[in-house]
């Protein structure tokens, strides 16, 4: 696997070097009102930190590339992936209670921390309140469980995973019962409990995932600590321009989940009856990749990052993990960006409607009502 930090020690193609000469990309990124990029200055450990970061409204900086960890099939695979990611310079890890892998992430991170190969303040760990923990009293309970598994005193970002809810007892051993919907969801009461965790220092930043604009706005109006991040499905076929613009205006950073179009989620086609798109094989994407001597995955990720959006691609393969963060030594020019922008299919490009989560579409906080009319 090579020694720690090996692939962080980049030469002329280092992210820092490339950002200094990627004017158009950087301009686009800094268009976020409250989002700025911090380029790390020091060397040694800091050579791993030269991945650009997005400043969060509540303080702190979030690396613009993180490792997604959903649907890794076995424990050893995840441990290998995490080691490879940390060696490749990732410092941002995305997990969730419902992924049931926090204990493995904790095991690997604690090894790296104990061996002095990484400092806690250089890591950025996100986890999420589960859909079956959507009552205020559940917040400290689930966050404490996550922290124990992660072997951390705090997470860098705590997200409400879904705006809708299922009853706690409807979740059993990784499965959510068909009609476990909990209709009593009160986002403002949950947010107050989230704020208490922030105040206590157990969650450095707070955010939401899969929320729509109305739901975010309602929280923002009441919040002492407004949401610092929104995590949503976002990729070439579902570019999410309206909600990204809304977030830009309101100082909410955006994280793109499934930034490669989730090609591993083959099961999705069985549920939805729709074929899973193969964004990595699109002719335009391949053509742009050849032009820049990069891979299709790198073009897809760069397209999103160049819009100032954080990406969390998942891979279990060390070579792909390395590849997915090596996106700072080239810039997509205006014609590349226009070509890729034009492939947006809006709502028709959305992959995940989350209807497979016990009766979610019947819940009053189901966020994508336009999908229900289709
Ligand atoms: N908040 C939410 O509700 C939510 C929902 C979905 C996902 N997420 C988060 O977002 C992360 C990413 O989303 P995702 O896992 O759905 O999809 P994704 O990152 O778009 O795609 C992952 C798939 O792409 C493959 N892949 C990765 N890098 C590649 C490369 N360079 N070339 C070719 N194929 C590559 C992976 O296969 P290999 O592993 O075999 O390389 C895997 O099958 C998740 O892991 C999770 O952390 C959050």
Image (cartoon, helix red, strand yellow):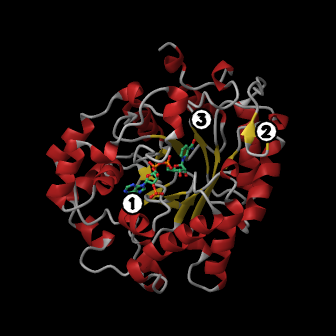
Q: Image quarter for residue 41? A: bottom left
How far apart are the two marked residues, 3 and 2, measured between alpha carbons? 30 Å
Badge 1 marks a residue whose secondary structure is loop
Q: Is residue 26 left or right of residue 64?
A: left
Q: Say which label, 3 or 2, has the lower sequence index.
A: 2
Q: Mark 1 sits on what residue?
A: 37
Q: Is residue 287 left or right of residue 245?
A: left
Measured from the top left, where is residue 9 in percent x and y? 37, 81
Residue closer to the observer: 107 or 145: 107
How far apart are the two marked residues, 1 and 2, measured between alpha carbons? 40 Å
Residue at the limit of the structure toward the top, as seen here: 373
**Disc 2: CA contacts within 10 A as few (<14), some (14-19) or many (>=20):** some
**Disc 1: CA contacts within 10 A as few (<14), some (14-19) or many (>=20):** some
Measured from the top left, where is residue 178 in percent x and y? 73, 27
Eye-nearest disc, 3 or 2:
2
Q: Mark 3 sits on what residue?
A: 220
How far apart are the two marked residues, 3 and 1, measured between alpha carbons? 24 Å
Mark 1 lies within 8 Å of ligand 1 (Cβ measured): no
Asked whether the beta carbons under mark 3 and mark 1 sit within 8 Å of each other, the answer is no
Badge 3 marks a residue whose secondary structure is helix
Q: Is residue 208 left or right of residue 201?
A: left
Q: Say which label, 1 or 2, has the lower sequence index.
A: 1
Q: Say which label, 3 or 1, has the lower sequence index.
A: 1
Q: Is residue 22 left or right of residue 81?
A: left
Badge 2 marks a residue whose secondary structure is strand
Q: Mark 2 sits on what residue?
A: 171
Measured from the top left, where is residue 265 in percent x and y? 50, 43
Picture layout, residue 171 above or below residue 364: below
Q: Image quarter for residue 180? A: top right
The number of numbered badges drawn on the structure is 3
Measured from the top left, where is residue 83 in percent x and y? 54, 74
């Amino acid at each position: 696997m090579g020694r720690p930090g090996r692939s962080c020690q980049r030469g002329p193609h280092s992210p820092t070097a490339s950002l200094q000469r990627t004017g158009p990309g950087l301009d686009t990124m800094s268009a976020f009102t409250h989002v700025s990029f911090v380029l790390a200055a020091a060397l040694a450990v800091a050579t791993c930190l030269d991945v650009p970061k997005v400043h969060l409204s509540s303080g702190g900086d979030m690396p613009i590339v993180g490792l997604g960890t959903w649907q890794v099939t076995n424990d050893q695979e995840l441990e290998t992936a995490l080691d490879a990611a940390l060696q490749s310079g990732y410092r941002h890890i995305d997990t969730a209670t419902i992924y049931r892998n926090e204990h493995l992430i904790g095991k690997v991170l604690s090894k790296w921390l104990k061996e002095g190969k990484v400092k806690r303040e250089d890591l950025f760990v996100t986890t999420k309140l589960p859909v079956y923990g959507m009552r205020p009293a559940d917040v400290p309970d689930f966050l404490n469980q996550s922290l124990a598994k992660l072997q951390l005193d705090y997470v860098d970002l705590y997200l409400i995973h879904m705006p809708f809810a299922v009853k706690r007892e409807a979740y059993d051993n990784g499965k959510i019962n068909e009609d476990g919907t909990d209709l009593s969801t009160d986002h403002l009461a949950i947010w107050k409990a989230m704020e208490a965790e922030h105040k206590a220092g157990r969650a450095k930043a707070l955010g939401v995932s899969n929320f729509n604009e109305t739901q975010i706005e309602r929280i923002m109006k009441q919040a002492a600590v407004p949401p610092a991040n929104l995590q949503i499905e976002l990729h070439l076929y579902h570019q999410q321009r309206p909600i990204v613009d809304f977030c830009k205006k309101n100082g909410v950073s955006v994280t793109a989940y499934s930034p490669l179009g989730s090609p591993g989620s083959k099961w999705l086609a069985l549920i939805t009856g729709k074929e899973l798109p193969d964004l990595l094989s699109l002719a335009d994407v391949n053509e742009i990749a050849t032009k820049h001597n990069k891979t299709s995955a790198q073009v897809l990720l760069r397209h999103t990052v160049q819009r100032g959006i954080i990406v969390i691609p998942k891979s279990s393969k060390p070579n792909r993990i390395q590849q997915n963060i090596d996106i700072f030594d080239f810039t997509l020019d205006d014609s590349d960006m226009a070509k890729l922008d034009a492939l947006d299919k809006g709502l028709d490009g959305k992959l995940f409607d989350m209807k497979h989560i016990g009766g979610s579409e019947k819940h009053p906080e189901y966020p994508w009502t336009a999908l229900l009319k289709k």
